[in-house]
Amino acid sequence: MAYNRSHSATYLAGQIAKGFARSLQRRATALGFSPGQFPVLLELWQEDGLTQKQLLDRLDVEQATLANTLARMERDSLIQREQHPRDRRAQIIRLTELGRELERQAINAAAEADAALFDGFRQFERELMMEYMRMVIENARKL
């Protein structure tokens, strides 16, 4: 019996993730950030001045991945790091003015990327798909 990858949720989820990343990539590059930086930006727009550990806990990524992402963001002048006032081992991650100014445009770019991939969906279909994706993500966290 031949394996049909179009019937594999794991395969399809990977393809969806690649599609959303590509859709955001074109828009993000024009604005000066990458899709991998977007989750960090979202967290800092919501609460600026987090530690790297707080970001790790909120983003569910590997330490090395986050460290590399933050280094690129610092290089690109999106964030700056400050010594934590009470913990010499920790650093506070803060948005720069450029990072703060990017918020509206970046969120619009992400909404455009979503809209492009949901083209042809009716509103209730999009909402249902989003709910299913949240359920799958929650199940994956239990593994």
Image (cartoon, helix red, strand yellow):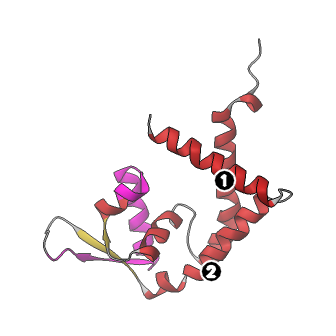
Residue at (52% x, 60% y) in the render: 36
Q: Is residue 64 above or below residue 88?
A: above
> Regarding mark 1 in the picture, which secondary structure is present there?
helix
- 122 or 91, nearer to the observer: 122
Amino acid type of the residue tagged 1 in the rendering:
Met
Whether the magenta-drawn stretch holds residue 67 is answered as: yes
In this view, which residue lies farthest toward the right?
Answer: 120
Residue at (21% x, 66% y) in the render: 90
> Which one is in front in this view, the residue at disc 1 or the one at disc 2?
1
Tell me which segment is drawn in magenta. Answer: 56-85
Give the percent coordinates (x, y) of residue 45. 46, 76
Amino acid type of the residue tagged 2 in the rendering:
Gln
Give the percent coordinates (x, y) of residue 97. 45, 88
Residue at (39% x, 66% y) in the render: 70
- Please rate how many residues cluster around mark 1, counting C-alpha atoms within 10 Å: few if below 14, some from 14 to 19, many from 20: few
In this view, which residue lies farthest toward the top?
Answer: 1
User: Is mark 1 in CB contact (under 8 Å) with mark 2?
Assistant: no
Give the percent coordinates (x, y) of residue 120. 86, 57
Residue at (64% x, 57% y) in the render: 21
Instruction: Give the Cα separation between the discs numbered 1 and 2.
Output: 23 Å
Image-based side of 12 in relation to 77, left or right: right
Give the percent coordinates (x, y) of residue 103. 55, 80
Whether the magenta-drawn stretch holds residue 61 is answered as: yes
**Residue matched to label 2:** 105
Residue 130 marker: 1
Could you tell me which quadrant the N terminus lies in?
A: top right
